[in-house]
Image: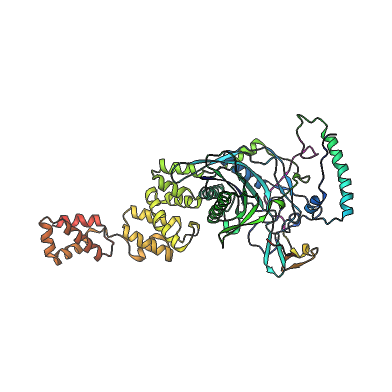
């Protein structure tokens, strides 16, 4: 039988505010244990949560970017459960009336068949603390610094049909929230975490199979592998005549498998109710309009602009626009040299090659957009040849420095002085009378030999076009 | 009154992390049943067309500027904690 996987993702996105969602404690990553957990975060008696305006703005920004309905009236609820990293015994979240309603994104597919993925909703909530299991014998250490960090939980419709699509969706959302500057996107620090709901059904069926949920996956690769494992597991059970149990599972990357965390009998019962500490959130259309005015150019629009206004190929435009850091780098380079094709070539070629080899992101690039832009400008104005430009690029990567200064110090300036070149050419012609005779007899290939000799003599600094012309004049 | 809502007190006790004796369960069942009866009675009121209220106050949420205002000294808060070490709160081992 042919099986069709059905997948929906819940993404937990840490919003890039300075302070917590309901308190004035810092959200900075990496502080010493519990130095950023204030009385509100700890849920001490008598404290009151007060909502962070910036978290609301960021949620609205996201909603606008996915064309979602923005609910001007929304409510905060208590989601009740006991866990040591949740000191209040409940998480403040939004249940029936989230701030962002239904929207969608277009999932870019390599084969060009783009898919519309529905977003059910996105709501604001607070993050929990961290449990440290391996630091104290027989005890668990609790660090509540993360408690109260604002989260936007983005819930997709079950519109994804493969593990690869799910990972692509996660990647695209990662790019989007970074474009919007509402999340730093640092997966290693848990800035974005993913829960995946997975089921399978016979191809052509319109009813859903029983689903399982894989919790807390924090890398694109692991999302893809965990879902792939889970799809295969479901198919094996169903083909063996069994039934899939609804349960919560976790992915173990070391063994590349998922394991049961909580069975059906332990299913959650969160007893949501409106939080009496928080009044309903009412935002105005003016507030929403002001956020809309701040929306940056989004990846899709940027890609079209690169193709249409800058004349880049579809491939280059996509390559440069997907990641906001790459796009910003490209635009800064372009700003200096005003040569889109060369900017694309240098970023996608030499720079990307160097960064890959050194395992660096473009935000950690040893060369700045100013350096790359100036290098291209010197190539365009004839100061550098393509060969000396590459030498200069390697030098900038390893040594740094200012472009024009490095050109001087390394003596990379192309020899445009006809007199000096002329002398060198005369000498080479005199030294190679046989080849001169061949060239005179019409053997055009020999011209390449002479140009090569000149380039060798000048250490690549001669302008090949000029050398060609001079040799022809002399013969 | 139509169907009475039934109460599973052991389940509720587990959710609230309460350990109740058989007598306590039976007493709690009786108490809670009265509350549920009262709610069932309220359910009989026709509320069609009335917007549900999330809060009794007719007011809306004030928003805070996104500014760090709290400097935390964990020593102060941890005086209340039964067990701490290296500024971590310690709890009985939670098996993941």
Figure quadrant of residue A132 = bottom right
Whether residue A424 can be seen here: yes
Q: Residue furthest front?
A: A241
Where residue A101 appears, as percent x and y from the top left, is 63, 39
The residue depicted at 74 percent of the width and 40 percent of the height is: B60
* Picture coordinates of residue A427, whole percent (x, y): 17, 65
In the picture, the quarter occupied by the C terminus of chain A is: bottom left
Is the residue A117 above or below the residue A174 in the image? above
Magenta residues, as a range?
B52-70
- At horizontal 66% and vertical 44% (from top left) the residue drawn is A123
Relative side of A367 to B18, left or right: left
Quarter of the figure with residue A66: top right
Q: Is A396 or A20 nearer to us in this picture?
A: A20
Q: Is A226 located above or below residue A111 in the figure?
A: below
Q: How far across and how far down the image is residue A308, in percent?
A: 41, 40
Q: Which of A367 and A233 is in front in this view?
A: A233
Q: In this view, does A152 lie to the left or right of A433?
A: right
Taking the spot 72% from the left edge, 65% from the top edge, the residue there is B93
Identify the colour scheme used.
rainbow
Out of A231 and A68, give the one closest to the viewer: A231
Question: Is B59 contained in the magenta span?
Answer: yes
As drawn, which residue projects farthest toward the bottom?
A: A137
Total label count? 0
Task: Decide whether residue A77 is among the magenta residues.
Answer: no
Q: In this view, does A108 lie to the left or right of B33?
A: left
Secondary structure, magenta segment, majority class: loop
User: Could you say where residue A304 lies in the image, as x and y percent from the top left?
Assistant: 44, 41
Between residue A37 and residue A375, name the one nearer to us. A37
| Residue A195 sits above or below residue A406 on the image | above
| Residue A293 visible in the displayed image | no
């Amino acid at each position: 039988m042919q099986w069709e996987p059905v997948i929906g993702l819940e993404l937990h996105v840490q919003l890039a505010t300075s302070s917590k969602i309901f308190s004035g404690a810092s959200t900075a990553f990496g502080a010493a244990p519990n130095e950023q957990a204030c009385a509100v975060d700890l849920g001490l008696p008598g404290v009151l949560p007060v909502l962070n305006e910036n978290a609301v703005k960021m949620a609205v920004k996201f909603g606008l970017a996915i064309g979602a309905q923005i609910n001007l009236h929304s409510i905060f609820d208590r989601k009740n459960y006991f866990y040591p990293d949740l000191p209040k015994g409940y998480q403040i979240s939004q249940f029936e009336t989230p701030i962002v309603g239904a929207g969608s994104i277009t999932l870019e597919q390599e084969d060009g068949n783009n898919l519309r993925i529905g977003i059910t909703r996105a709501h604001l909530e607070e993050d929990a603390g961290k449990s440290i299991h391996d630091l104290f014998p027989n005890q668990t250490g609790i660090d509540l610094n993360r408690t109260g960090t604002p989260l936007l939980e983005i819930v997709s419709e079950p519109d994804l049909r493969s593990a690869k699509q799910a990972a692509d969706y996660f990647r695209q959302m990662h790019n989007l929230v970074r474009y919007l500057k509402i999340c730093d996107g640092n997966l290693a620090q848990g800035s974005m975490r993913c829960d995946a709901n997975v089921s399978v059904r016979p191809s052509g069926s319109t009813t859903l199979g029983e689903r399982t949920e894989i919790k807390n996956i924090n890398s694109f690769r692991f999302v893809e592998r965990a879902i792939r494992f889970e799809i295969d597991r479901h198919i094996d059970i169903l083909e063996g005549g069994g039934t899939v149990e609804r349960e919560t599972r976790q992915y173990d990357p070391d063994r590349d498998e998922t394991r049961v965390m909580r069975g059906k009998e332990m299913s959650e019962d969160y007893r949501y109710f409106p939080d009496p500490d928080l009044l309903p959130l009412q935002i105005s259309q003016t507030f929403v309009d002001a956020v809309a005015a701040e929306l940056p150019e989004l990846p899709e629009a940027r890609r079209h602009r690169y193709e249409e206004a800058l004349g880049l190929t579809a491939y280059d435009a996509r390559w440069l626009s997907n990641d906001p850091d790459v796009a910003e780098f490209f635009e800064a380079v372009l700003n200096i040299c005003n040569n889109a094709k060369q900017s694309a070539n240098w970023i996608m070629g030499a720079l990307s090659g160097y960064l890959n080899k050194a395992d660096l992101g473009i935000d950690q690039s040893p060369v700045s957009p100013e350096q790359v832009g100036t290098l291209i400008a010197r190539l365009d104005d004839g100061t550098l040849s393509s060969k000396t430009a590459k030498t200069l690029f390697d030098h900038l990567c390893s040594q740094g420095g200012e472009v024009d200064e490095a050109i001087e110090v390394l003596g990379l300036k192309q020899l445009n002085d006809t007199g000096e070149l002329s002398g060198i050419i005369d000498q080479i012609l005199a030294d190679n009378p046989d080849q001169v005779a061949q060239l005179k007899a019409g053997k055009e290939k020999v011209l390449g030999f002479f140009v090569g000799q000149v380039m060798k003599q000048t250490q690549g600094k001669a302008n090949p076009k000029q050398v060609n012309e001079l040799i022809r004049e002399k013969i | 009154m139509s169907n009475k809502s039934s109460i599973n007190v052991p389940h509720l006790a587990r959710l609230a992390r309460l350990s109740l004796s058989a007598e306590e369960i039976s007493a709690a069942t009786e108490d809670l049943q009265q509350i549920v009866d009262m709610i069932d009675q309220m359910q009989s009121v026709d509320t069609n067309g009335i917007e549900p209220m999330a809060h009794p106050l007719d007011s809306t949420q004030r928003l805070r500027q996104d500014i760090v205002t709290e400097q935390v000294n964990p020593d102060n808060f941890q005086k209340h904690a039964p067990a701490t070490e290296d500024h971590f709160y310690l709890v009985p081992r939670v098996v993941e």
